[in-house]
């Protein structure tokens, strides 16, 4: 039983009019049942409708299609007539009950099932079952206790290093064929964890600078002195510079490193002409602009980590969720995943157990996404928080910002409706979480600065050097897979394309959109 499941149904409510008399029972997972006694008038009207529907679709010898007398239709097609009669009784009963009880369906395309206990021309008794929207408690933000986040450093040294990274973006790359790797080189290589079969790929065709600031010590020892094409095996170990907690949590792994290419970088001169390529007039302005962007990134980092804490707090608030909406969200997410050809190929070749693992993971993320969607909608309604098209972040025209923050979540108004909805949901989520942050309590214990999520092998301080010169493009709006988790955010090392600049640590916010509404409701007979 999940945390949102209630242990028992709520007390019954009773309603009646001239056509129906029924009791309402609310059950776990937003299931509502109507136990209905249907009066004779409604039952007879339902039989007339059923006879007309069946008669229109059958052919009786001696009569034109749809023109056979009701008595003959009932005699020749008793099973078809009875099945349709039960459906019409259920439809009519639900219409009457809905007007009296005023319990909304969870979505317009939700299914209403029924179980007929007895029916005749004198009346009927049946149970109607459907899912309704969840009852969400109001959120008390003071109960959310946030741990303080250490703001990343934005020192002159970091500004200088960032300027150097922008130079590398425009660098000319010279392949080295006649000597082994030395300090200051760049290597494009694959890294695999070989403790399992098949080996797990950690990096593929990823460029690293052979320097203490850019590469883990264990990796640097492996590649120094090696030539192109070398395949070296070793064990990852914790760097000396890691904190005691990081060293304690570190797990050594056996790895295989394959050196694909050795390169030297010829960077452009650091002068005013170079600065103008980045949208400023001088090197001094370049330093100031990069400093401002780094400060903005530091502030965003703190706010993102606070939002992650708020997300976990909101997810901990118990309330029932309708299974129908969770399944619809999971189906949507799985369909999106299937559009990835690599995932589709992997799926087709997977065993049933592996597929079940994927489905379970998607269902878990879908449940989190639906939960955070409903509770944020509740907060926004209670606090009058709204989002308009003007609130959506547009792609930046600043080449420096595009270069330093390529993973930013931007909105293109020309995108399809689905992505428009995702953009609105993402901004609404951020605003509701920011409201919680403003009114939350604060823990005294400080958290260490959160770094890029690392695999079990020590990540080699991956500062992937940019590759060959290319124009700085506007960042494209990225789809929010549905929140991040919502699970909210995920960070991880990505292969460095040989002809595009990539900043090492890229974080992509995964915000979820509201589940989609589609078709009209139907009444369906429950399986016996």
Image (cartoon, rainbow, N blue to C red):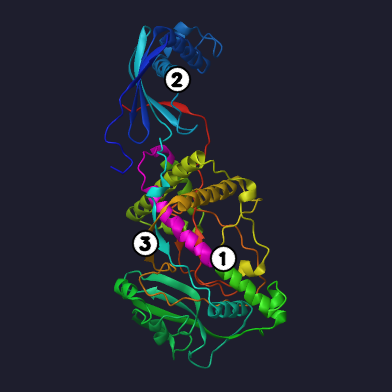
CB under 8 Å between discs 2 and 3: no
**Is the N terminus in the top left, top right, bottom left or bottom right quadrant?**
top left
Front one among 360 and 59: 360
Looking at the rendering, which quadrant does residue 79 occupy?
top left
How far apart in space, not on screen, are marks 3 and 1 (Cα)?
A: 24 Å
Q: Which residue is mark 1?
A: 296
Label 3 vs 1, first from the N-terminus: 1
Q: Residue at x 55, y 50 (%)?
A: 427
Q: Give percent across and percent down for residue 217.
A: 40, 83
Q: Residue at x 43, y 34 (%)?
A: 133
CB under 8 Å between discs 1 and 2: no
Q: State whether the magenta stretch is mostly helix, strand or loop.
A: helix
Q: Mark 1 against mark 2, which lies toward the viewer?
A: 1
Find the magenta span and give its range.
296-325
Label 2 vs 3, first from the N-terminus: 2
Label 1 vs 2, first from the N-terminus: 2
Q: Which residue is mark 3?
A: 444
Residue 175 sits inside the magenta stretch: no
Front one among 276 and 64: 276
């Amino acid at each position: 039983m999940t945390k949102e499941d209630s242990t028992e149904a709520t007390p019954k409510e009773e309603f009646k009019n001239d056509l129906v008399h029924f009791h309402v029972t609310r059950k776990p997972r937003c299931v509502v049942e109507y136990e209905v006694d249907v009066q004779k008038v409604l039952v007879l009207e339902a039989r007339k409708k059923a006879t007309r529907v069946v008669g229109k679709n059958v052919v009786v010898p001696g009569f034109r299609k749809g023109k056979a007398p009701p008595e003959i239709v009932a005699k020749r097609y008793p099973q078809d007539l009875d099945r349709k009669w039960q459906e019409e009784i259920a439809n009519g009963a639900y219409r009457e009950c809905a007007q009296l009880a005023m319990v909304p369906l969870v979505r317009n395309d939700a299914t209403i099932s029924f179980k007929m206990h007895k029916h005749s021309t004198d009346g009927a008794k049946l149970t109607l079952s459907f899912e309704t929207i969840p009852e969400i408690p109001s959120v008390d933000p003071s109960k959310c206790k946030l741990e303080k986040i250490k703001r990343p450093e934005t020192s002159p040294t970091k500004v200088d290093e960032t300027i150097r990274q922008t130079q590398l973006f425009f660098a000319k790359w010279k392949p080295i064929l006649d000597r082994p790797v030395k300090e200051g080189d760049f290597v494009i290589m694959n890294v695999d964890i070989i403790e399992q079969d098949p080996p797990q790929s950690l990096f593929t065709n990823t460029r690293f600078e052979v320097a203490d600031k850019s590469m883990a010590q264990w990796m640097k020892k492996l590649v120094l002195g090696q030539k192109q094409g070398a395949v070296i095996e070793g064990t990852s170990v914790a760097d000396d510079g890691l904190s005691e907690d990081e060293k304690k949590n570190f797990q050594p792994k056996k790895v295989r490193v394959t050196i694909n290419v050795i390169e030297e970088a010829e960077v452009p001169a650091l002068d005013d002409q170079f600065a103008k390529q980045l949208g400023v007039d001088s090197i001094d302005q370049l330093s100031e602009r990069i400093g401002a962007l780094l400060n903005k990134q530091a502030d965003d980092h703190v706010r993102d980590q606070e939002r992650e804490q708020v997300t976990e707090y909101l997810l901990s608030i118990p309330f029932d969720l309708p299974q129908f909406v969770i399944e619809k969200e999971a189906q949507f997410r799985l369909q999106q995943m299937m559009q990835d050809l690599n995932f589709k190929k992997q799926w087709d070749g997977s065993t049933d157990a592996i597929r079940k693992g994927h489905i379970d993971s998607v269902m878990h993320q879908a449940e989190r996404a639906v939960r955070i969607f409903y509770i944020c909608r509740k907060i926004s309604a209670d606090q009058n928080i709204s989002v308009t098209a003007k609130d959506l972040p547009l792609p930046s025209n600043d080449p420096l910002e595009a270069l330093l923050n390529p993973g930013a979540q931007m909105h293109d108004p020309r995108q399809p409706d689905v992505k428009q909805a995702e953009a609105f949901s993402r901004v609404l989520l951020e605003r509701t979480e920011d409201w919680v942050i403003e009114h939350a309590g604060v823990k005294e214990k400080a958290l260490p600065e959160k770094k890029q999520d690392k695999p079990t092998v020590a990540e080699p301080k991956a500062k992937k050097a940019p590759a060959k010169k290319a124009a700085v493009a506007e960042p494209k709006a990225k789809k929010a897979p549905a929140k991040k988790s919502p699970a909210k955010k995920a960070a991880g090392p990505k292969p460095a394309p040989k002809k595009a600049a990539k900043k090492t640590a890229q974080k992509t916010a995964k915000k979820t959109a509201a589940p989609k509404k589609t078709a009209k409701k139907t009444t369906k007979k429950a399986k016996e």
